[in-house]
Amino acid sequence: MQLNTKNFKTDLPSGLVVFLVALPLCLGIALASGAPFFSGIISGITGGIVIGLLSNSQLSVSGPAAGLAALVLGAITTIGDFRLFLCAVLIAGILQVLMGIGKMGGIANYIPSSVIKGMLTSIGILIVAKQIPHAFGYDKDEKGNITELLPYGSENMHEFLQPLQHIEVGVTLICVISIIIMLVWERPAIKKRLPFIPGALVAVIAAILINQLWISTGSVLAVQNEHLVQIKAASSPAEFLGFFTFPDFSGFFNSKIIVYGFAIAIIASLETLLSIEAIDNLDPERRVTNTNRELMAQGIGNAVAGLIGGLPITSVIVRSSANVNAGAKSKMSSVFHGLLLLVSVILIPSLLNKIPLSALAAILLLTGYKLAKPAVFTQTIKNGRFQYIPFLVTVIVIIAIDLFGLVPAVSGKGLLIGVIAGIVAAFGAILHGNLKNSYFFHKEKHHEGDQIKIHLSEEVSFLNKAAIRETLDQLPKNATVTIDASNTTYIDFDVLELIKEFRDIKAPIKNISSKLVGFKEKYQIENELNVQSVH
């Protein structure tokens, strides 16, 4: 829990940058989740301060995640009581602590990247679909049925044009302007000159100023209060404390709440572990996070959020990468960003209440598009059937359940069911195409400086990823390692990425000389020696 105060000069400015990125995202994710705006801020504060203090990761930043928005929206809608939902968040936090104690930090290694990619793509599609009403000014509570998003709830498709009567021109214009600002802000010419100012913040400020101008001039385009953020303003510390919502503990005896708790725990843990792995690779100092401790920190953070009215929390890649790019050196920057969120909700709630919902919808629309852009589909298909079959199954199942409502009884839990379906599809694809030799991994006894030869068997699937990672991570310093793929007919994409990571990043750190031989052209990985096998 000790903070490194010697890096204040870099960590405090970085914390400010992360705060500027996190503030609109906290509000936007609360909007996408169908939860009170204050709950998004609570999770940002908890993720920054509580998890920031407990986490072993020096550069990751935690908070409410867009990846859980669809699940949370479905849960709140199905449960019908936000206080009962908070009990599910508390259960998720307790489960994550138990997962950490049980040393399950390596669980992400057993989930194929194609399934995880499918889950994230589905989340992007769901986010875009759910924000369409807010973008046009028809802020109706959606329940996940596509007919509610097109004719705004009408089951009569002859009334398809009726939604045009509900479009608010001012709301729509602000959404369009916000998207344009963020797209322009991502252009290299601006990004290089103003790298520490996030485009989302610029879009939100511009939306506020434009709407205030419309209001002051009496324009018909002025966005009304029902289309603005609504956070309570406290006149005293006691009143502020009264804004927090506490869980209904009767949910501990409700099977539906318990199931949602398990779903949140699994999805949140996967998102966190993937984010942590990505940030560790971005860390200039190459520090490695203890994933078991991270699960416990996340669990404590989610338990706290559930107790005081927050949304589920994960380590999030957008805020974490912003933290790295801003030059952060330690987790003090994450803690500082949490403190700034706390100060903002106490001192400037009236300013936050001027933010149009369509500006937040614009942020989420771009976030969703980046997760589900066409390039994701084309690249996955290029990687072969062992990648695109689980990917497409995951996407189709999640969208069918959570967007089209084809299985209403489980609406809101489509993410978990889709992930399970994707894993089953991955097993099926491997068994169908690879009913041959099982995986074989040979490792000779060694000590520092030894010559080590690793032979890959005929079939190497994603199930072998965890064992291979563990073996490569335990290789001694100054060794010479040869990885021979001469006998292979199939190597899973995840394992190939793992071998590349070892060769390019981990081996140089430990002064290990690595040689790859026998890798076929289809693997898209270079051989260091032009030989067929190693004896």
Image (spheres, rainbow, N blue to C red):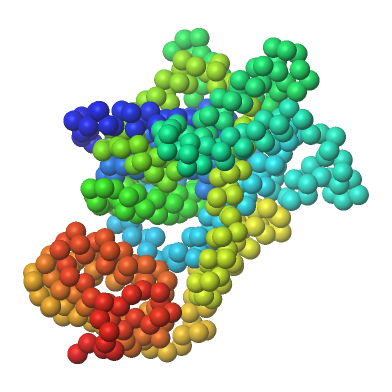
Q: Residue furthest top?
A: 235
Q: Tell me if I can see residue 307 in this picture.
A: no
Rendered residue at 49%/82% (across/down): 431
Q: Is residue 469 left or right of residue 299?
A: left
Image coordinates of residue 158 in percent, x first then y, are: 91, 49
Compared with 228, 193 (above or below) is below
Q: Is residue 61 left or right of residue 203?
A: left
State which quadrant residue 6 falls in. top left
Q: Tell me if I can see residue 527 in this picture.
A: yes
Rendered residue at 34%/42% (across/down): 324
Rendered residue at 51%/13% (across/down): 234
Q: Residue furthest right?
A: 158
517 or 390, nearer to the observer = 517
State which quadrant residue 394 falls in. bottom right
Image coordinates of residue 238 in percent, x first then y, are: 45, 13
18 or 327, nearer to the observer = 327
Q: Residue furthest front?
A: 189
Question: In the rendered image, which quarter contains the N terminus?
Answer: top left
Image coordinates of residue 24 in percent, x first then y, are: 52, 32
Total marks placed: 0
Compared with 407, 434 (above or below) is below
Q: Is residue 440 left or right of residue 198?
A: left
Image coordinates of residue 14 in percent, x first then y, are: 34, 32
Compared with 92, 41 (above or below) is above
Compared with 277, 224 (above or below) is above
Rendered residue at 26%/38% (across/down): 329
Q: Is residue 29 left or right of residue 496?
A: right
Question: In the rendered image, which quarter contains the C terminus?
Answer: bottom left
